[in-house]
Each structure stands twice: as structure tokens, then as C-alpha cells.
Amino acid sequence: MLMLAFWALALPVAALLAFPWTLLSRNASFLYRVGMRSAWTGVRLAGVSVRTLGMERLDPRGTYIFMSNHVSNLDPPILLPIIPGRTSVMAKKELFDYPLLGEAMRLGSLVPVDRGNRDAGIAAVRAAGEVIRQGINMTIFVEGKRSFDGKLLPFKKGPFYLAMECGVPVVPVTIVGTHEIMPKRRFSIRPGTATIVFHEPIDPKDFGDRDSLMAKVRAAIDSGLPPEYREHSLPTTNENSGCSP
């Protein structure tokens, strides 16, 4: 409740100050800082502490595609604020239909995606490529949805097509602990510690095809999970990905 109350108070501030500034200046930097600070503060007010591992592997001046597992609604407000520099994400296309919000999201270089439309998924991958070429990181929850049991789901193919096309390093990220703090389909938050593991960046140029890159990223993310959540064999990929080219 503290987290939601804080966000409810922060939203009018963003609406009255950050949104107009963003729209007038055509620059989303201030809005981005307000959003990330609000997300981080709200999570901490909920009693969640965050531990990071592997940050020294990242060049703050570099551009990366961060690919993470996804087990809780808390994952975005925990992960995004600690990523060095600025990052973009893919967001539901319906959000872009709201006049002020949609324009601010476009200025912030967020990428609209329609997960139920294959052609739209291809367009989203291309749009994400344009964002990366601007020097903005891209963060993707590569399973496409939250896991019920904390174990990895099949990966979407679109992010790996994006990585091969852009040639920027991929950083596998393992989020641990949020499944216990706020599992899927539970509203309440149990205070605890979330651990974010940044694995060694992977250069897509070292792989001949996206399936090999996908296997490497999957193995890295899986290695950071607690032993009871790790898999013994890799499941087949999701052939019906909305982002599959």
C-alpha cells in the first residue's frame, strides 16, 4: 500500500511537471529520471531491498540489449532503474493511443508492440533496432510473460533476431527473489531481498545463427537461478512468437 500510495502521489507530479516539460522540450530525459526514481523509491517503501551482482562487467558508456527472465510484476520497477544509462522497453500498443501519455512514450523512444499480431511484432523489432542505433539500451523480458513457478519459459525469437541484426552485445540478466516477494496473481508484497545478476555480455557476432545465441543466453540466465528452479534440458523455442520475423 505504501508503494502504491507513493506512486499515486508521484503521478500527478509527473503529469504537472515532467510531462509538459517533455512535450515542450521534445526531450524525455527529465521524465525518464522522474519515472525511474519513482519506481525505485516505491519498491523500497514496500520493504524490498535489492542486491546487484556483475555490474562491473558493464561499460556505462556502452549500448546493450538486456535480456531477463520474468517472474513478478516487481521485475520492471526493480531492474530498469539500475541499468546504466537510459533504456527503452517494449510496451503495449494500446498505451500509445492516450494523447499525452502516448506522445511522451514516443519521445522516450519506447517501442509499441502488439503481441497478438505477427506482422506488428516484426515492425516492433525493427523499431527497437532504430532505438538501439540511437545509443539507447533495450531491455526485454525474453520469455514474453511471467513464469508461474520461477522456472524459465520458452524464449521469444524476436529479441535474438534484433541482436543479430544490430550486432550490439547481449547482457543476460537473472532476477532472483521476486517470485517469492510477489508471485504471479498475488497483489500483496512480502518484504525481502531481490537479487539482480548481470552476466558477462555476449557478442552476437560470435554466433552463426540466432538459435545458438538463444541457447547461450538461456544457459547464462538459467545458471543464475536457485538450483531448484534450474532446468536440466533446454525446452523447445516458441515457434509462435509475436516478434518472430
Image (cartoon, grey):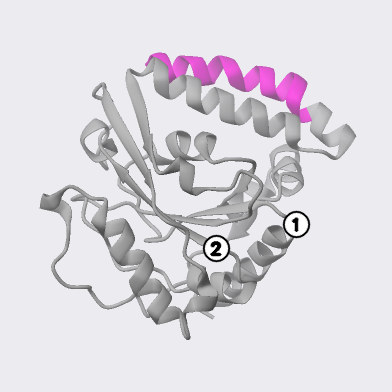
One can see residue 91 in this view: no
Q: Report the quarter where the N terminus lies.
A: top left
- Circle nearer the N terminus (2, 1): 1
Q: Which quarter of the figure has residue 185?
A: top left
Tell which of 95 and 232 is nearer to you.
232
5 inside magenta stretch: yes
Q: Give the secondary structure at mark 1.
A: loop
User: Residue 14, image x and y in percent?
Assistant: 68, 23
- Start and end of the magenta stretch? 1-19
- The residue located at (88%, 34%) in the rendering is 25
Count of marks placed on residues: 2
Indicate whether 170 appears above or below 216: above
Label 2 with label 1: CB-CB less than 8 Å: no
Within-10-Å neighbours for mark 2: few <14, some 14–19, many 20+: some
User: Residue 106, image x and y in percent?
Assistant: 73, 49
- The residue located at (46%, 21%) in the rendering is 42
Tell which of 65 and 203 is nearer to you.
203
Outermost residue, front direction?
56
Q: Which quarter of the figure has residue 218?
A: bottom left
Q: Report the quarter where the C terminus lies.
A: bottom right
CA separation in Å, label 2 and label 1: 15 Å
Which mark, by number, is residue 83? none
Outermost residue, left direction?
228
User: Residue 173, image x and y in percent?
Assistant: 39, 51
Q: Give the secondary structure at mark 2.
A: loop
Tell which of 105 and 117 is nearer to you.
105
| Residue identifier under label 2 | 169
The three-letter code of the residue at mark 1 reads Gln
- The residue located at (17%, 57%) in the rendering is 230
| Residue identifier under label 1 | 134
